[in-house]
Image (cartoon, rainbow, N blue to C red):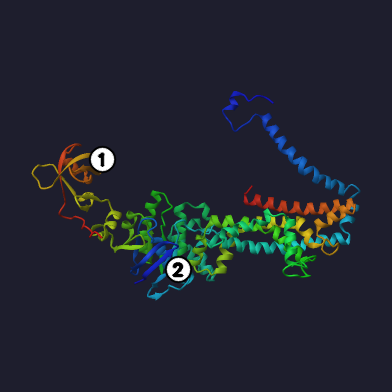
Amino acid sequence: MAIEARNISKRFGDYLALDDVSVLVPEGSLTALLGPSGSGKSTLLRVIAGLEVPDAGTVLIEGEDVTRRPARTREVGFVFQHYAAFKHMTVADNVAFGMTVRKRPKDQVRARVSELLELVGLAHLGKRYPSQLSGGQRQRMALARALAVEPRVLLLDEPFGALDARVREELRAWLRRLHDEVHVTTIFVTHDQEEAMEIAEQIVVVNEGRIEQSASPAQIYDQPATPFVMSFVGPVTRVGDRLVRPHDVQVLTEPGESGEEAVVTRIARLGFEVRLELLPPEGEPLTAQLSRTEFEQLEVTEGQIVQIRVDPTGVTKEPVSS
Amino acid sequence: MKLVSPARRDAPSSRSPSATLLLRSVALGYLAALLVVPVGMVFYRAFEKGFGTAWDAVTTPPAQHAFFLTITVALIAVPANAIFGVLTAWVLAHYDFRGKRLLDVLIDLPFAVSPVVVGLALILVWGRDGWFPSTDVIFSTPGIVLATIFVSLPFVVREVLPVLEEEGTDQEQAAATLGARGWQVFWRITLPTIRWGLTYGVILSTARAIGEFGAVAVVSGKIQGRTETLTLYVEDRFQSLDLTGAYAAGVVLALLGVTVLAIMTLLQRRHGRI
């Protein structure tokens, strides 16, 4: 294991940020720490980096206990949400920082800086100052700076959180490609489940200072371990006493079929997807998600009474309620 | 004054030329009456009997001594305030601790308390009947330095602290993860970040240190040629009815102040902060 956190606890005053948390991150993987804000995911990342000292627990990097080591000697690359650019230095000097504080030979530093700027697509901007860059460029500079010291692990704290939606999408894809190129073990923190699903190989879902589940994106979605995971990583609706994904709700118009009756209260056409809001005679309203083709074949209208049932095949495995 | 024309009323930010002229005249007239004229008078009176007379008045041994004492005191007090000011601001910006708010308020105490009280307080501590009776502090240079440090203490903290608070600790933490040691983080990241705040703090501190009168008057004993700073010397000449000497020394003080102000203005222009 490249990174192992064992039984980490961390308290800030009365607030328990991490409650006996353990995480394993395989060598060379791209792992997402996914959770709502205030769940403790950033704290866990900062504990691994050495920016916070845990109250209890052990952090191992490549099998070595680093819990008592300062951030400086842990050989981690850390990228902050708000870039943490050194504003008084040029882009090239920012990237060179880790090497200059280690007093590496100048020509070696220069060669590595230009190589990294090339890698992150900022080769032509080395002489600029961070204030002259866009948010996306600043974050790529921060990544190059973190990679410059050849870290054993790369830790990204909501790296795209401060960027606008379009740039965020671009950078996600770019980070995925970069990871395939450099292969450094990477953990990134995000509250965006789509972002986690799209780039991570392993997702660790964190909630209220605890780990809810740690698995591949597909498993997280299809076999959520807890109701929290199920509702956090995708839409859910309640059918009777079951929690299901809206696309697992089947809507049938032909009479006599086994199912529960419900009234169609609203139809929302969202391009490819059509969402039906349904109200069973007894019970709570629920949502069904259909493709446009399915919807057109059904020919339902608002106010119509339909049969609903949960798709028995390919259904999301229901979590055991805790 | 003309009435505002209807067309002008649509643009509330732009006033009629005559109103602008009036406002400008009031502001400038106020400044002239209260600042320029009195200071100008000092210059005029100093050089009334010719440049030579004024020069002779400020080059007497007691005048020279006062000049160099003032510079010496500033050279000790200002670096001391710069170092402790940065340290205090750094601690306030980086740590939460019991009594932090109290410390924050205490820093402004020198602004709030009259310098004369500061002088008296120092005598209560170091004087003959004080807690630590010492003949080397009161009526001597160390006492003057202490009084000057006290009155000019808040400037550096007040200029540096907001910069540190605004910048946060991300850059310092980033530097640490990149392998920088504590002092490398300070020299390469923290100090460059606060350099302008520190510069302004030092300049304001210097101006205050040079100009301090009340606190220094109490602790120094005003012994001519020994503990008389430039401000005390001006008063001494005035009381002795040596008006040329008083005005000439006043000009030296004013020039020191103006120089400090000019440096500050130049730096602000370069830094684009006006």
Chain letter of mark 1 equals A
Instruction: Estimate the spatial distance between the alpha carbons at disc 1 and disc 2, rounded to whole Å.
Output: 50 Å
Residue visible at 20% across and 40% down in the picture: A264
Q: Quadrant of residue A317?
A: bottom left
Residue visible at 81% across and 45% down in the picture: B40
Image quadrant where one finds the N terminus of chain B: top right
Q: Which residue is mark 1?
A: A268
Q: Give whichever of B50, B122 is nearer the camera.
A: B122
Question: Considering only order in the chain, which callout, 2 or 1, is on the residue closer to the N terminus?
Answer: 2
Question: Is A308 on the left or on the right of A5, as rendered?
Answer: left
Chain letter of mark 2 equals A
Question: Is B179 on the left or on the right of B136, as rendered?
Answer: left
**Residue furthest out toward the bottom:** A64
Q: Looking at the picture, which amino acid does disc 2 mark?
A: Val
Q: Give whichever of A17, B168 is nearer the camera.
A: A17
Q: Which residue is mark 2?
A: A53
Image position, residue A267 (x, y; %): 23, 39
Q: Is residue B217 above or below residue B25?
A: below
Instruction: Specify whether disc 1 shares its chain with disc 2.
Output: yes
- Say whether marks 1 and 2 touch (CB < 8 Å): no
Q: Give whichever of A131, B77 is nearer the camera.
A: B77
Work out whether residue A211 can be spotted: yes
Q: Looking at the picture, which amino acid does disc 1 mark?
A: Ala
**Residue furthest out toward the left:** A256
